[in-house]
Image (cartoon, coloured by chain):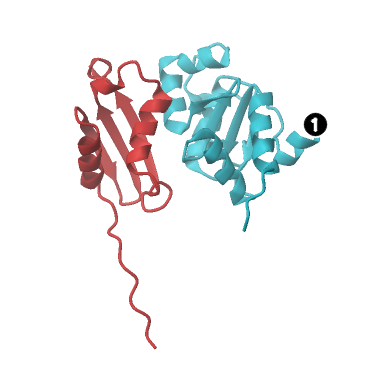
C-alpha cells in the first residue's frame, strides 16, 4: 500500500514576506527583503511604529508569521522604523 | 490528559527572570554558543562588560516552550533585564548601535564594536535546577 505523497509547501520567498507584511500593516513599506528560502531579513518602514517599543514593533511582524517562525521560516531578522527614523 | 495546576518548570523560569538582573536565554553557553544569533548576543553583552546569567534552552525543549509562553516571544535568544524582555538578537544589536543597550544595562557604552571585545569575567551559566535550588 503506497502512502499518498505528502503535500509540498513551497519555500517562502522574500517577495511573499514583503507582500504579507505590506498587506497586514496598511501604511507600511518593506524596503529590504532578502532571504535564501530559510533565513530572511526584512526592513519595515511604517509610521504606525511611532511611540511603539522595539519589542512590540517586532511582535507585530512576528504575529503575521505566527506558527511559521522556526519552522517554514527558519529565521527572520527584523528591523522596524518610522519614516522619520529611516531618514 | 488533565493539565495539572502546578507547573514547576514555568515557575522556575519565571523565578529566574525575576531574580537575575540580566538573564540571557540562549542556545548553548556563552563559552560555546550553538547558534549564530546567540553567539552575537553574547558578544554584544561581553563588549559592554555586562555581568549576566545564561540559561541554555537546548537540553530540554520544554524550557523553550515555557519561556515563549511567558514572554510571548517566539525565538531564541531572549535577553531579560530587571525582569523585562528587552529583545532578541536584532533588537540587542540595534540597541548596541544606538547606545540604548548601555543605558538599559547601566554600563558605559563600549568604545569598540563587539568583535574586538576583550575577555571579560562572566557569571557562571545558570541551569533551571540551580534557580530552584537557591
Whether residue A40 appears in this view of the structure is: yes
Where in the figure is residue B96, as x and y percent of width and height? 46, 20
**Residue B9 lies in what quarter of the image?**
top right
Badge 1: residue crowd in 10 Å (few <14, some 14–19, many ≥20): few
Q: Is residue B117 above or below residue A78?
A: above
Residue lying farthest to the right in this orientation = B133
Where in the figure is residue B91, as x and y percent of width and height? 43, 27
Q: Which residue is the site of mark 1?
A: B134
Query: Which residue lies at the image location 47% right of the left edge and 26% below the top edge?
Result: B92
Q: Is residue A78 left or right of residue B76?
A: left
Chain B, hue in figure: cyan
Q: Quadrant of the C terminus of chain B?
A: top right
Residue lying farthest to the bottom in this orientation = A1
Query: Which residue lies at the image location 59% right of the left edge and 32% below the top edge?
Result: B24
Q: Is residue B110 above or below residue A72?
A: above
A50 or B116, nearer to the observer: A50
B76 or B19, nearer to the observer: B19
Where in the figure is residue A41, as x and y percent of width and height? 32, 38
Q: Quadrant of the N terminus of chain B?
A: bottom right
Chain shown red: that is A
Whether residue B31 appears in this view of the structure is: no
Q: Is residue B100 above or below residue B59?
A: above
> How many numbered marks does the figure carry?
1
Q: Secondary structure at mark 1?
A: loop
Chain hosting mark 1: B
B98 or B118, nearer to the observer: B98
**Residue A24 lies in what quarter of the image?**
top left
**Residue B117 lies in what quarter of the image?**
top right
Where in the figure is residue A56, as x and y percent of width and height? 40, 27
Q: Is residue B25 above or below residue A57?
A: below
Query: Which residue lies at the image location 24% right of the left edge and 34% below the top edge?
Result: A32
Q: Is residue B16 left or right of residue B72?
A: right
Amino acid at each position: 500500500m503506497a502512502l499518498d505523497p505528502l503535500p509540498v509547501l513551497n519555500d517562502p520567498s522574500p517577495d511573499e514576506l514583503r507582500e504579507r507584511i505590506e498587506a497586514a500593516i496598511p501604511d507600511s513599506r518593506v524596503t529590504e527583503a532578502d532571504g535564501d528560502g530559510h533565513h530572511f531579513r526584512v526592513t519595515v518602514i511604517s509610521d504606525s511604529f511611532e511611540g511603539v517599543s522595539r519589542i512590540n514593533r517586532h511582535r507585530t511582524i512576528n504575529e503575521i508569521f505566527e506558527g511559521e517562525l522556526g519552522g517554514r521560516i527558519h529565521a527572520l531578522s527584523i528591523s522596524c522604523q518610522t519614516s522619520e527614523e529611516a531618514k | 490528559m488533565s493539565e495539572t495546576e502546578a507547573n514547576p518548570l514555568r515557575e522556575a523560569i519565571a523565578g529566574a527572570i525575576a531574580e537575575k538582573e540580566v538573564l540571557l536565554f540562549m542556545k548553548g553557553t556563552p563559552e560555546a554558543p550553538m547558534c549564530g544569533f546567540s553567539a552575537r548576543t553574547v558578544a554584544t553583552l561581553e563588549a559592554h562588560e555586562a555581568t549576566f546569567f545564561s540559561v541554555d534552552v537546548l537540553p530540554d525543549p520544554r524550557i523553550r516552550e515555557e519561556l515563549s509562553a511567558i514572554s510571548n516571544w517566539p525565538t531564541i535568544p531572549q535577553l531579560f533585564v530587571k525582569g523585562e524582555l528587552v529583545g532578541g538578537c536584532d533588537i540587542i544589536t540595534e540597541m548596541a548601535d544606538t547606545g540604548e543597550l548601555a543605558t538599559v544595562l547601566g554600563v558605559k557604552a563600549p568604545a569598540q564594536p563587539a568583535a574586538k571585545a576583550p575577555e571579560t569575567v562572566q557569571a557562571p551559566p545558570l541551569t533551571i535546577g540551580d534557580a530552584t535550588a537557591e
